[in-house]
Image: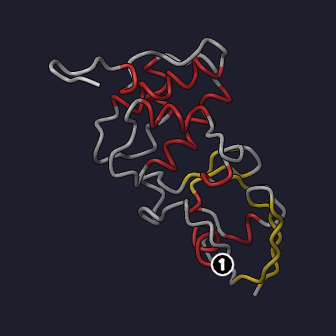
């Protein structure tokens, strides 16, 4: 067993882990941070992306002992209390999720993308998220959500076109 210490979502955890334990398993099974799903265990899908010292990492490809001394942000630590991060809000408002399985990794990858490129084009968003697989959405609304979050984070306000902006169906009355 190896001794590790890591700061996860603002809380310092010290624990003993088997050297072969993957970070995603340690977070979920030992620390109860279950917002990060286990997708493929082969680093192909991107569902388990989180931030280690501010950089996107597929947590199924990192051993817990490699994360010793780091600061980790999971999807659960991204929001500021009850206030969702702009990327989280945009995913909700633009239907950037369906089953939700890939969403934590997509959101974390998008946050990292926007940190490095606050004004991405549609092609740059697609390229930035190409390591994340989604089987439900077709990516259109995910890209729209990331572009909207980028606009909001630049102080320009969210991009119109969310379900909240949709016109009322014909014949509907309040």
Residue at the disc numbered 1: 30
Tell me if residue 68 comes above or below residue 47 in the rendering. Answer: below
Q: Nearer the viewer, residue 21 or 146?
A: 146
Q: Nearer the viewer, residue 59 or 84?
A: 84
Residue found at x 59% / y 60%: 59
Residue found at x 71% / y 47%: 81
Tell me if residue 165 comes above or below residue 111 in the rendering. Answer: above
Residue sitting at the far left: 171
Q: Quadrant of the N terminus?
A: bottom right
Tell me if residue 76 comes above or below residue 113 in the rendering. Answer: below
Residue sitting at the far front: 174
Left/right placement of residue 41 relative to residue 74 reads: left
Q: Nearer the viewer, residue 43 or 102?
A: 102
Residue 114 in the image, given as x and y percentages of width and height:
62, 28
Tell me if residue 47 comes above or below residue 98 in the rendering. Answer: below
Residue found at x 43% / y 15%: 160
Q: Quadrant of the C terminus?
A: top left
Residue 132 in the image, given as x and y percentages of width and height:
44, 45
Residue 157: quadrant of the picture: top right
Residue 106 in the image, given as x and y percentages of width and height:
49, 43
Q: Nearer the viewer, residue 151 or 166?
A: 166
């Amino acid at each position: 067993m190896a001794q590790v210490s890591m700061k996860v979502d603002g809380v310092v955890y010290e624990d003993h882990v088997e050297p072969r334990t993957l970070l995603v398993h340690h977070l979920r099974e030992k620390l109860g941070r279950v917002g990060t799903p286990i997708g493929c265990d082969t680093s192909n899908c991107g569902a388990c992306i989180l931030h280690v010292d501010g950089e996107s990492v597929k947590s199924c490809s990192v051993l817990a002992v490699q994360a010793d001394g780091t600061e980790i942000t999971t999807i659960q630590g991204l929001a500021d209390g009850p206030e969702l991060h702009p990327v989280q809000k945009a995913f909700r408002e633009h239907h950037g999720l369906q089953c939700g399985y890939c969403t934590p990794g997509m959101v974390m990858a998008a946050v990292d993308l926007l940190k490095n490129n606050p004004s991405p084009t549609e092609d740059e968003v697609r390229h930035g998220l190409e390591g994340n697989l989604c089987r439900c959405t077709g990516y259109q609304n995910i890209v729209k959500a990331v572009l909207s979050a980028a606009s909001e984070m630049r102080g320009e306000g969210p991009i119109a076109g969310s379900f909240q902006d949709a016109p009322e169906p014909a014949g509907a009355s309040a």
